[in-house]
Image: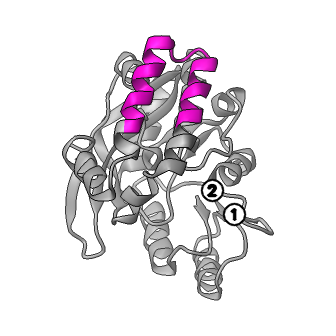
Amino acid sequence: MSVYKKEKPEYLQEAMESVFNQSLVPDEVVLMEDGPLTDELEQTISELKKKYPQIVTFSFTENVQLGRALAKGVELCSHELIARMDTDDIAVYNRFQHQYDYMMAHPAVAVCGGWMQEFNDEGTYSRQKQMPQSNEEIQRYARYRNPVNHMTVMFRKQAVLAAGNYRHMPLLEDYDLWSRMLVRGMEFYNLPEVLVRMRNNNSVYERRGGMAYFRQYAAFRWEQKKMGWLCGREYLMALLLTMGVTLQPNFVRKIIYRRMLRR
């Protein structure tokens, strides 16, 4: 998990409680403090560490952003199986148990994700983001879209390190990592069930649009082509699809996400 100064202490509290109220409780939770935090966040983390001694923190002196924070976090994790979690989402009660059981029964699988369901601050649940299930389906899907809900993922540490770990690529840190793992032939799977409730608001759609974000995404598509994940035709198609979403007005992009990219 990674936290920075703009996150709300009450969200972090809820997220962490959902982690420790699991049917399979983690042996260790590595919490990256990405730069200086507010006094309220510091107080919340201090109280959580007293309540849950499994929490290990690492503090950056300045904000390094998510990709760099997660890369260091992976290195610090003591165990081979690592679950990702955002600090404002809620893990479903049996999430870790189901993923752990699957990973133990399928040692060839490097990454195991699942579905997520959106909710708002009023506690109203809405759309689910369902994902392709088998490795073959995931490979096809990943040519054009991120094939794993990042906040739901459990992966093998050595596989992630072998692919080069997370990199600094804002809002695309996970898709970048999955692409590098897939091109190396690593196996993926998505459990066909909701594993995480994702807190949602309009800022989610705003962050995924605009010319600056399109340029960043276009550079990433070129990286996918260079690494051999996309052929020329697939690269052009992926670029057009990216343009069609990122360069829309925010209200149009919101409709696209809700009606086409969620189901």
First to last magenta residue range: 218-243
Q: Is residue 2 left or right of residue 236?
A: right
Q: Secondary structure at mark 1?
A: strand
* Residue with the mark numbered 1: 56
Q: Which mark is residue 233?
A: none
Q: Element at badge 2? A: loop
Identify the amino acid type marked 1. Val
Looking at the image, is 70 positioned above or below residue 176? below
Asked which quadrant contains residue 133, the reply is top left
- Rate crowding at label 1 as few (under 14), some (14 to 19) or many (20 or more) other CA atoms within 10 Å: some
Relative depth, front residue between 89 and 145? 145
Residue 256 vs 93, above or below: the answer is: above
Q: Residue at x 60, y 82 (%)?
A: 47
Q: Is tag 1's residue or tag 2's residue first in the polypeptide sequence?
A: 2
Q: Which residue is mark 2?
A: 28
- Within 10 Å of disc 2 (Cα), the crowding (few <14, some 14-19, many 20+) is some
Residue 60's image quarter? Answer: bottom right
Residue 261 covered by magenta stretch: no
Q: CA distance from mark 1 to mark 2?
A: 7 Å
Q: Is residue 172 left or right of residue 98?
A: right
Residue at image point 19% right, 46% down:
259
In this view, the residue farthest toward the right is: 61
Marks 1 and 2 in Cβ contact (< 8 Å)? yes
x and y percentages locating residue 2 in the rendered image = 61, 60
